[in-house]
Each structure stands twice: as structure tokens, then as C-alpha cells.
Image (cartoon, rainbow, N blue to C red):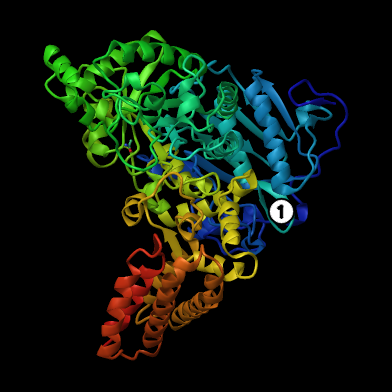
């Protein structure tokens, strides 16, 4: 017996039949009503009645303009088993082409893997991780060895060619997956495609009344955009290596391929520098990554098909650098690490040769550590105050005929770009760096809007979109899902200009994140962004996205992400065990205010603990969304659905009870005191909703007095409470409006 990385030998038990003959009966979901009819007969019956087209080719012919196809031939699992993939496979991001076929590959302890084709450490490593995860997912102990005749292994992983030594933005990520009754085959031109295909395969695993299985399927997949990133800011709040690693795992699970590491800003410089050790010694308060840790993370990311791009923001957002080297600043120091959030004056001096000498050595050092061809230099939000106040810098501008600070920054960027090129790097920066003097190899990351991205594409620069993907805005997954890098102004671009838009990046800025809550701010919402960037644009059905997102959400917990566990831990800290049940329920009625509101509501500093309710509650409440669906359904029925309205009332009544039950908990915890008004507000709001549903159910028009009293309650519900928003305000408003409009 050998590990799957080597050639197999030994004996292996014969796999049991993949399909239990007794169950060899199918139903054509979701259209067919022929239960317990053999597959062939079922097809005939359905063809006769034209209920359902089986022919995938016919389907693609019908919709020839679609660049993708999802073809449900026959589903080998009957609806009465209640398995999760009835409504379609719970794949996310949805592959380009999915053809479900009759049959299923049953899984048990005999499941085994063999590798064929090109040997690559990433492929063998991924195969081992795949088995580990499969084992965790199913609870079935799986051998890491290929036993017996390798040709009879359950899964063949066939990597056709070698990948690039350093993964580029043009890496081939395509793969083809065939799952049949007895075995499965994953084929890809490169190791990266194999990594992507293994994630799809894991998502296919399901269970029914018989066993764990993968549905028989043929998938061909490749990404729509080649740049699918996640930025994590580790400067404003520090995130240790293990947080980064688990987020890399999650990125790989949804096929994201760029980790943008925002390593320096006013509030911290988080990278060890051997050439300039004062940077991490004075700029980080001991919270920095050693070079060995960074190399390990880069290797960890590479194994998962993820590129790592460092960002050292400059010439602005450099306070932490200037703490260490004040002589690089546009005004004399000393400087201190910034504690607050916003845009600050300290800025590098673009008129000084010292600045460029420092950058040459520093970038030279970093370029050797970060292998990616791109190097992010930030370049955003230079307020120019130091430059305006410096006679030396003003004289320099005049001498070099630089008409304004934008021109001065462009001068700085030109020199910076040459330094980067000297060290083998391409420059990427935020919108503000765009300037015609820069070579077209420079790439723009657009945080200000698609119009900026489209503008850079028009001028010949490649770019990625981040506007609309800011996770700190605490918008729902559906919002981010609706943002397309080729949408809005970009729709007017020529094909060539469009080809310069390489994708997008979700951004996790760190004003309000800690290792405890970061996962919940990133996941699962980022999976919706990952789908927008990977899947065909036509995959855009929001309810179906949420159906599959719920599945990914659970899978990410299996993978070790702390998006639910972290929130639970924080709630428990606030209340101990006594009131944890009502507090958890209550938390589902709230969501944190976005960054823009929170900074207006309180003056924060990086030294303040983020251990309050606003830091613990999830950005998007599933309970609130489901309640809104319930209300919509109840109201959609002609003159209201009595059953639906009764369910609405029951839910509101339970929440009202929860809000009341919390009263005692609030008095016992200083961390909870501040949510008293929110609990009271929710008590009033749920009462109002309950009454509205009752009016609707009994078709009684409410009195003007009730309508008059409802308005201020609804108004209050729209305001922030302890830096949170009430997640069920909108559906209750709908109920009140519907009740008020009763004849
Ligand atoms: C940015 O949000 N200033 C890139």
C-alpha cells in the first residue's frame, strides 16, 4: 500500500455496486410525477406527454446564445428522500455546464483515488486534502492509500500538463468532471483545474435514505473572469496567520484565486523587514508576520491555487512607515501609529531622493519574498496637506512643471513603477494612480465605481472591480451578487476594452473586524461574489443563489471557518449560558450598521474592544430574509393568505416573547445594557406587525388612531440602535401598509 502520491499496489475490497438494484428507479425532477417507474419507461411517458425535455443538446439548441448550459437529464434520487439537491445541484459557484445524468455514485469506505497524467505536488496534496474533507463530511473513514488495482479506484484524477511555477493571472483553471455509477473522473489541463474540480466534487456529495453519494453528472467548467480576489486588511486590526490560512481555505472552496494582503496602513505595518527592521519593530506593536510565516502562507495559498499580492499603500496611508522612518515624510516627525479611522495627513515626500532609495531597497527585499508578478502600491486617498504645506515640495513641483498634487503623485508613481519593473514586478494600484504617463502594464483596482474601471479599460489599462464588493458596508449577499464588473458603464465598452476588465475583488477592510468576527464579515457573502466572478453572467437567480449559499455556509463551517462559531462565542461572552438561547434569537433580528454609519455614531480607535452586540451579530440575517419571504407570500395571495398570515403572527409572537425574555439578561451584563432600547423597539415593532397581520387575516380595517401610532414605530425601526439596524423592519412595514390599505 502506498500513499496516493505514489504508484499503488496491494489488494482492495471490491466496491459495492454503486446503484442498489432495488432502487434503480428514477423520477424526473422537478417536472415529472411518475414515481416508482423505471427510468426508461419514465422517459417514454414524459416524452409522450411533452412534460419535460430530456435532451441536453436540444436544450442548448433552444438557447444557442447562452454560453453555458445546465441540463438536468434524469435525477437518480426521488423527491421523497428529501435530499438537498432536488431543486438542482447545490454547486457554488455554479459551473459553466452541468449535465445531470441517470444514476449515482454511492460512497462508502472503499472510496479511493488514483492520480494519472502529470505528477504535481499540488495535485497530490489536494487529493489528500480532498480525502480528509470527504472523511469529515461523511464521517466515513477513508484510506489515504490506493489499494488494489489502481484501474479500479473510484476517482481518477488526471492532470494533463504542468502548471506554471508561479501561477499567473492567465492560468488555465478549466476542468471536466464525469461522475458515473461506478466511478468518477476529473480531468484538467493543469494542476489549478484539478484543484477547482475537486472543490466541485466535494460540493456534489450528498446523502439520501440509502447512502452518501454523488449524482451522476458531467461538468465542464472554467471561470468567466480570471481575477477573483479577496482583500484582507491586517493593518487596522491585526489578523494572525491562522486566520489568514482558514480564509484561504474558504477562498479555495469557492474557487477564488487572488489573496490581496493589505499589509500596511496608517494603523500598522505588519511585515517583517530585515533591510528596515524599524518598520515592523516600531510600526506594528509586535503584531506582524515574520518572513518565514509569510513564505509559509504564500506556499499554503499556492497549494490551493491562490496568488498572493502584497499591498504596501503609498505615498498616503503611510503613518506606520513614517513612525519608523520620519525622514521619508513630507513634514518633520516624529510620528505615532494612528489610532483612529479615516484619511490622515502623513505622506511620503515625493521630492526626496531618500524616498526612492528607501523604496528601491524595500521593494527589492519584498519582491524576493512575494513571487507574484503584481505588486500593489495602494495610491489612494492622498490628501496632499503635507505637500501643500512644504515650501520644498512646492518648489519641486514648480521646477518639474507639475501643475497640481495629482501630477506630483503621478511623478511619484512613474518613479515607483520603474523601481517595481527593475525588481520584476508589475504595478497595481487604486483608481487614483490612473495617469496617461504610466505604461499600459499598470493595473487599476477600482474602488470608486465601475465608471472608473470602464475609463481605465477605455484608456488601455487592465483593471479589477472592488466598488460594490466592500464587505464592511454590511450589504446583503444579493446586493454584491448584482454587481457585475462588466455591468453599468462597462456595458458600453468594445470587446477589446472589456477584455481588459479582469475581474474583481471583495474587500474586507478592518476598522471593525477582529480574529473573532472576521469570518462572519467575509463568509458566506463572499461566496456570492465568487460566483459572480466565476460563473456565466446568466447565472443570476437570487433565490437560487440563496438556496446554494445556505449549503456553502454549512460547508464552510465544516472547513473550519468561524463565521457562526465566532458569533456564538461572542454572544456567550455577553451573557453566559443563562440567556444564550433568547440572545441568539434576538441577534437574528439585528445586523451591524455599515462602516459609514458606525464611524459617525461613535468615535472609534483601534484600542477599543470590538466585543459588543454590533460586532457579534451577522451582516445578513437568514431568519429575517425568510420572514420577509413569508410576508411576501402571505401578502401575494389574493386578499392575503390566512395560513400565511397566521404563520407570520406566530413568528412575530415568538420574537416578541424573545425580546421580553431578554430584559433580565440585559441588566446583568454591561455589554448588553446598550441594547435595551433595541429590545424595546423590537417588542413594539413585533406587536405592531402582529396586529397588522391580525387585521389582514380578519379583513378588518384598522382605525386611524392605530395607523397614526404605527408611523413613529416604523420610523424608529429604520434608525440605528447601538450601531445596529433592525433586520425585520421592512417586512413589518409592508404588513402595516397592507393593513392600512384595507377597504
Ligand atoms: C480605498 O477604499 N480607499 C481603497
Q: Position of residue 203 (x, y in %)?
A: 60, 44
Q: Is residue 598 visible?
A: yes
Does residue 439 appear to the left or right of 272 in the view shown?
left
Residue named by callout 1: 24
Taking 343 as reference, is 140 left or right?
right
Along the viewing direction, whichever of 125 and 366 lies nearer the viewer = 366
Image quarter for ligand 1 equals top left
Residue visible at 13% across and 12% down? 399
Q: Position of residue 592 (x, y in %)?
A: 42, 57
- Position of the N terminus by quadrant: top right
> Quadrant location of residue 734?
bottom left
Q: Quadrant for residue 230, please give it.
A: top left
Residue at image point 59% right, 39% down:
246
Q: Residue furthest right?
A: 11
Q: As drawn, is 686 to the left or to the right of 31?
A: left
Residue at coordinates 31% horizontally, 89% vertically from top-left? 702
How many residues crowd around disc 1 within 10 Å: few (fewer than 14), some, or many (20 or more)? some
| Secondary structure beneath label 1 | loop
Q: Kindly give the residue lying farthest to the top in the view shown.
A: 422
Task: Residue 491 in the image: state x and y as whole percent.
Answer: 25, 38
Q: Position of residue 395 (x, y in %)?
A: 14, 16
In which quadrant is the C terminus drawn? bottom left
Name the foreground residue: 62 vs 69: 69
For ligand 1, tell me if the residue under mark 1 lies within 8 Å.
no
Seen from the viewer's position, the closer of residues 352 and 421 is 352
Q: Residue at x 53, y 59 (%)?
A: 30
Q: Is 126 or 598 nearer to us in this picture? A: 598
Report which quarter residue 714 is drawn in: bottom left
Amino acid at each position: 500500500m502506498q500513499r496516493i502520491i505514489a504508484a499503488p499496489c496491494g489488494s482492495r475490497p471490491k466496491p459495492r455496486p454503486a446503484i442498489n438494484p432495488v432502487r434503480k428507479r428514477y423520477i424526473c425532477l422537478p417536472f415529472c410525477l411518475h414515481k416508482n417507474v423505471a427510468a426508461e419507461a419514465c422517459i417514454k411517458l414524459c416524452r409522450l406527454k411533452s412534460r419535460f425535455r430530456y435532451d441536453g443538446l436540444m436544450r442548448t439548441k433552444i438557447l444557442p446564445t447562452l454560453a453555458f448550459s445546465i441540463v438536468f437529464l434524469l435525477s437518480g434520487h426521488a423527491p421523497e428522500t428529501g435530499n438537498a439537491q432536488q431543486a438542482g445541484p447545490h454547486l457554488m459557484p455554479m459551473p459553466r455546464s452541468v449535465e445531470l445524468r441517470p444514476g449515482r455514485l454511492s460512497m462508502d469506505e472503499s472510496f479511493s483515488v488514483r492520480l494519472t497524467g502529470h505528477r504535481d505536488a499540488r495535485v497530490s496534496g489536494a487529493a489528500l486534502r480532498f480525502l480528509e474533507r470527504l472523511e469529515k463530511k461523511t464521517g466515513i473513514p477513508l484510506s489515504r492509500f490506493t489499494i488494489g488495482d489502481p484501474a479500479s479506484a473510484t476517482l481518477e484524477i488526471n492532470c494533463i500538463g504542468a502548471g506554471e511555477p508561479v501561477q499567473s493571472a492567465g492560468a488555465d483553471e478549466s476542468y471536466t468532471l464525469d461522475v458515473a455509477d461506478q466511478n468518477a473522473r476529473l480531468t484538467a489541463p493543469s494542476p489549478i483545474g484539478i484543484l477547482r474540480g475537486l472543490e466541485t466534487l466535494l460540493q456534489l456529495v450528498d446523502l439520501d435514505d440509502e447512502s452518501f453519494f454523488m449524482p451522476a453528472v458531467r461538468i465542464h467548467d472554467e471561470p468567466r473572469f480570471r481575477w477573483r480576489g479577496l482583500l484582507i486588511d491586517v493593518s487596522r486590526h491585526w489578523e494572525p496567520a491562522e486566520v489568514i490560512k482558514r480564509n484561504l481555505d474558504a477562498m479555495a472552496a469557492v474557487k477564488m484565486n487572488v489573496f490581496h494582503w493589505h499589509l500596511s496602513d496608517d494603523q500598522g505595518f505588519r511585515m517583517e523587514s530585515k533591510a528596515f527592521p524599524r518598520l515592523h519593530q516600531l510600526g506594528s506593536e509586535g503584531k506582524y508576520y515574520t518572513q518565514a510565516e509569510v513564505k509559509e502562507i504564500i506556499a499554503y495559498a499556492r497549494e490551493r491555487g491562490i496568488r498572493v499580492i502584497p499591498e504596501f499603500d503609498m505615498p498616503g496611508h503611510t503613518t506606520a512607515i513614517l513612525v519608523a522612518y520620519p525622514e521619508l515624510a513630507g513634514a518633520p516627525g516624529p510620528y505615532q501609529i494612528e489610532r483612529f479611522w479615516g484619511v490622515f495627513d502623513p505622506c511620503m515626500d515625493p521630492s526626496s531622493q531618500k524616498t526612492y532609495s528607501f523604496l528601491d531597497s524595500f521593494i527589492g527585499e519584498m519582491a524576493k519574498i512575494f513571487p507574484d508578478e503584481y505588486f500593489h502600491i495602494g495610491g489612494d486617498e492622498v490628501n496632499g496637506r503635507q505637500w501643500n504645506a512644504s515650501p520644498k515640495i512646492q518648489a519641486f513641483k514648480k521646477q518639474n512643471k507639475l501643475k497640481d498634487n495629482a501630477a506630483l503623485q503621478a511623478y511619484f508613481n512613474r518613479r515607483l513603477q520603474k523601481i517595481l519593473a527593475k525588481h520584476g514586478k508589475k504595478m497595481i494600484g487604486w483608481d487614483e494612480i490612473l495617469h496617461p504617463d504610466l505604461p499600459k502594464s499598470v493595473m487599476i483596482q477600482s474602488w470608486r465605481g465601475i465608471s472608473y474601471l470602464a475609463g481605465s479599460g477605455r484608456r488601455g489599462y487592465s483593471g479589477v472591480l472592488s466598488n460594490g464588493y466592500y464587505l464592511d458596508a454590511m450589504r446583503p449577499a444579493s446586493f454584491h451578487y448584482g454587481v457585475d464588473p462588466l455591468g453599468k458603464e462597462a456595458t458600453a465598452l468594445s470587446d477589446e476594452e472589456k477584455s481588459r476588465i479582469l475581474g474583481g475583488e471583495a474587500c474586507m477592510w478592518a476598522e471593525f473586524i477582529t480574529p473573532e468576527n472576521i469570518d462572519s464579515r467575509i463568509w458566506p457573502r463572499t461566496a456570492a461574489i465568487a460566483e459572480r466572478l466565476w460563473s456565466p453572467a446568466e447565472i443570476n437567480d437570487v433565490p437560487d443563489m440563496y438556496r446554494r449559499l445556505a449549503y456553502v455556509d454549512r460547508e464552510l463551517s465544516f472547513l473550519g471557518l468561524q463565521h457562526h462559531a465566532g458569533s456564538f462565542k461572542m454572544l456567550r461572552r455577553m451573557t453566559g449560558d443563562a440567556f444564550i438561547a433568547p440572545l441568539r434569537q434576538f441577534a437574528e433580528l439585528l445586523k451591524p450598521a455599515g462602516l459609514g454609519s458606525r464611524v459617525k455614531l461613535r468615535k472609534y480607535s483601534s484600542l477599543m474592544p470590538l466585543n459588543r452586540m454590533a460586532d457579534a451579530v451577522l451582516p445578513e440575517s437568514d431568519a429575517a430574509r425568510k420572514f420577509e419571504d413569508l410576508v411576501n407570500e402571505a401578502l401575494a395571495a389574493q386578499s392575503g393568505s390566512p395560513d400565511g398570515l397566521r404563520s407570520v403572527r406566530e413568528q412575530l409572537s415568538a420574537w416578541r416573547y424573545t425580546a421580553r425574555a431578554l430584559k433580565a439578561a440585559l441588566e446583568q451584563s454591561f455589554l448588553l445594557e446598550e441594547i435595551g432600547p433595541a429590545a424595546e423597539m423590537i417588542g413594539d415593532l413585533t406587536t405592531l406587525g402582529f396586529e397588522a397581520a391580525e387585521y389582514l387575516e380578519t379583513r378588518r380595517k384598522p382605525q386611524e388612531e392605530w395607523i397614526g401610532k404605527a408611523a413613529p414605530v416604523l420610523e424608529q425601526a429604520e434608525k440605528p440602535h447601538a450601531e445596529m439596524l433592525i433586520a425585520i423592519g421592512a417586512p413589518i412595514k409592508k404588513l402595516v401598509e397592507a393593513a392600512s390599505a384595507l377597504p
